[in-house]
Amino acid sequence: GSLVGSFSLASQVISPNGDGVNDELGMEYEVLAVEGEARITVDIFDLRGNRVRRLFDMDGQSGVYRSDNQIGLRWDGTDGDGGRIAPGLYLIQLNVEGDARSSASTRVLGVAY
């Protein structure tokens, strides 16, 4: 079975323009059936497959991870260098690498200004 349970985004579109409305993306996911610890990463990719930003990279256990209580699970629409990204569609990929297997889940997000 998959190591990824639910994986949801707080919104399907963000508009990180500083007006206080949908400026950041929150997310929530669940890690299942991990004995000990697994490496958990959350990455943002453009549609060409280029990684725009790594949001989250840590060793974790089974459980629910939420943006309201976990550092790194909010995205403000910036790239790895802190610059604003171009408007368009992006892919958010959650990877969980356990001892015996790995699982991934991907969601689509729109960015508009």
Image: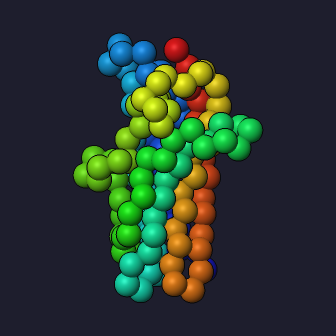
What's the coloring here?
Answer: rainbow
Q: Is residue 45 above or below residue 1?
A: above
Please tell me which residue is depicted at 42% across the width and 58% down the height of the picture. 57
**Residue sticking out furthest to the right:** 48
**Residue sticking out furthest to the front:** 81
Q: Nearer the viewer, residue 47 or 8?
A: 47
**Residue sticking out furthest to the left:** 69
Residue 11 visible to the viewer: no
Q: Is residue 40 above or below residue 69?
A: below
Please tell me which residue is depicted at 50% across the width and 33% down the height of the picture. 79
Please tell me which residue is depicted at 53% across the width and 29% down the height of the picture. 13
Which image quadrant: the N terminus? bottom right
Residue 10 visible to the viewer: yes
User: Does residue 56 appear left or right of residue 49 in this picture?
Assistant: left
Please tell me which residue is depicted at 60% across the width and 63% down the height of the picture. 104
> Exactly how many numbered labels are in the figure?
0
* Residue 101, quarter of the rendered image: bottom right
Question: Residue 21: x and y, percent?
Answer: 37, 20
User: Does residue 19 appear left or right of residue 32 in this picture?
Assistant: left
Question: Residue 91: x and y, percent?
Answer: 62, 43
Q: Is residue 99 above or below residue 106?
A: below
Question: Residue 110: x and y, percent?
Answer: 59, 30
